Amino acid sequence: MSTMRVSLVAILMTMLWFATEAAAKPQSEEALVRQTVETYLHGLKFNDVPSLKKAFYPEAKLFFVKKDGTLGQLTQEQWYKGFAASAGKQEEGELTVVATDISGNAASVKVREVYPTSVYTDYVSLLKLGTEWKIVNKVYMAEKR
């Protein structure tokens, strides 16, 4: 009977260890994904192109719906030009991560940016390339407040 208890305890301990390891890994990856997204948000908040370049894959594109209902898109270089006049200036507004979803080496993050005159909702797609998470795509919409 004692041997059975020892075996049962050993099995339960092993299961607990595996459960702990499985739970710890996604949290670690979530922290890394959030770190990349926080770098992106810092870039937005402070009009800081080097931060944006650190968060985005160089060939990432930004997609949106134009006023006429057609697809609009920007390359990274086109988008960065829009920050030139305000470089280093802190934007008024609240930027928050709304949701994070991670599957293996792919992730999707929803971000909400509330500024005095507008609200943006961003959906950024990230991939883990080597040991780093990079934003490889951004789809967004904007509305006036």
Image (cartoon, grey):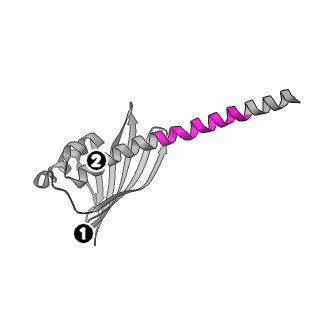
Q: Residue furthest top?
A: 3
In the rendered image, residue 27, in percent from the top left (x then y), is placed at 49, 42
Q: Is residue 92 above or below residue 136?
A: below
Q: Which residues are magenta?
A: 12-28
What residue sits right under mark 1 in the picture? 116
Residue 25 covered by magenta stretch: yes
Q: Residue furthest left?
A: 85
Q: Quadrant of residue 54?
A: top left
Residue at 66% x, 37% y is 16
Residue at 38% x, 43% y is 126
Number of marks in picture = 2
CA neighbours of label 2 inside 10 A, class few (<14), some (14 to 19), many (20+): some
What residue sits right under mark 2 in the picture? 61
87 left or right of 119 in image:
left
Q: Secondary structure at mark 1?
A: loop
Locate the C terminus and report the quarter of the image it occupies: bottom left
Locate the N terminus and report the quarter of the image it occupies: top right
Q: Residue type at mark 1: give it.
A: Pro
- Of residue 41 and residue 81, the one placed in the foreground of this image is 41
In the rendered image, residue 119, in percent from the top left (x then y), is placed at 30, 66
Measured in 3D between alpha carbons, the distance from the residue under mark 1 to the one under mark 2, in whole angstroms, is 26 Å
Answer yes or no: is residue 62 visible. Answer: yes
In the rendered image, residue 132, in percent from the top left (x then y), is placed at 36, 35
Q: Quadrant of residue 89?
A: bottom left
